[in-house]
Image (cartoon, rainbow, N blue to C red):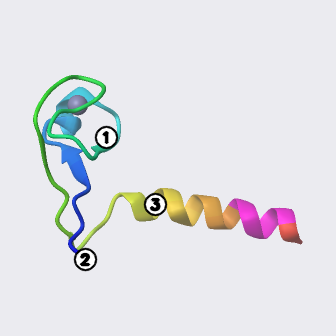
Amino acid sequence: MKSDIRVCAAWRDAHERPVYSLSSTCPECGGETENSAPAPFDPKDAYGEYRRALKRRVRE
Ligand SMILES: [Zn+2]
């Protein structure tokens, strides 16, 4: 199944982090969104790592 998650095309200027949406417009700034194609570096990973670190700390 093809992913149709989109990301605000102007998030680097308009937001502090990527704003994801399923619609063709950004829910926060109303700007256009673009297909969030898999990138070599995914900015979400930083947050995922942070969450995983927190989870580890809770478990220990
Ligand atoms: Zn936006």
Residue located farthest toward the right when viewing the structure as drawn: 60
For ligand 1, give the image quadrant.
Answer: top left
Q: Earlier in the sequence, mark 3 or mark 1?
A: 1
Q: Which residue is mark 3?
A: 46
> Looking at the picture, which amino acid does disc 2 mark?
Met
Q: Which residue is mark 1?
A: 19
Residue 57 is left or right of residue 35, and the answer is right
> Which residue is more in the foreground, 10 or 4?
4
Residue 36 is left or right of residue 27, and the answer is left
- Measure the C-alpha gap from mark 2 to mark 3: 26 Å
* Residue at horizontal 89 percent and vertical 72 percent from the top: 60
Q: Position of residue 55 (x, y in %)?
A: 74, 64
Image label count: 3
Residue located farthest toward the top when viewing the structure as drawn: 29
Ligand 1 closer than 8 Å to the CB at disc 3? no
Q: Earlier in the sequence, mark 2 or mark 3?
A: 2
* Disc 2, SS: loop
* Disc 1, SS: loop
- Badge 1 crowding class, 10 Å Cα cut-off, few under 14, some 14 to 19, many 20 or more, is some
Magenta segment includes 8? no
Instruction: Give residue 1's mark.
Output: 2
Residue 26 is left or right of residue 24, and the answer is right
Q: Position of residue 51 (x, y in %)?
A: 62, 59
> Which residue is more in the foreground, 48 or 29?
29
- Measure the C-alpha gap from mark 3 to mark 1: 15 Å
Discs 1/2, front: 2
> Looking at the picture, which amino acid does disc 1 mark?
Val
> Which residue is more in the foreground, 46 or 30?
30
Q: Which portion, as a residue range, is magenta? A: 54-58
Which picture quadrant has residue 13? top left
Ligand 1 closer than 8 Å to the CB at disc 1? yes
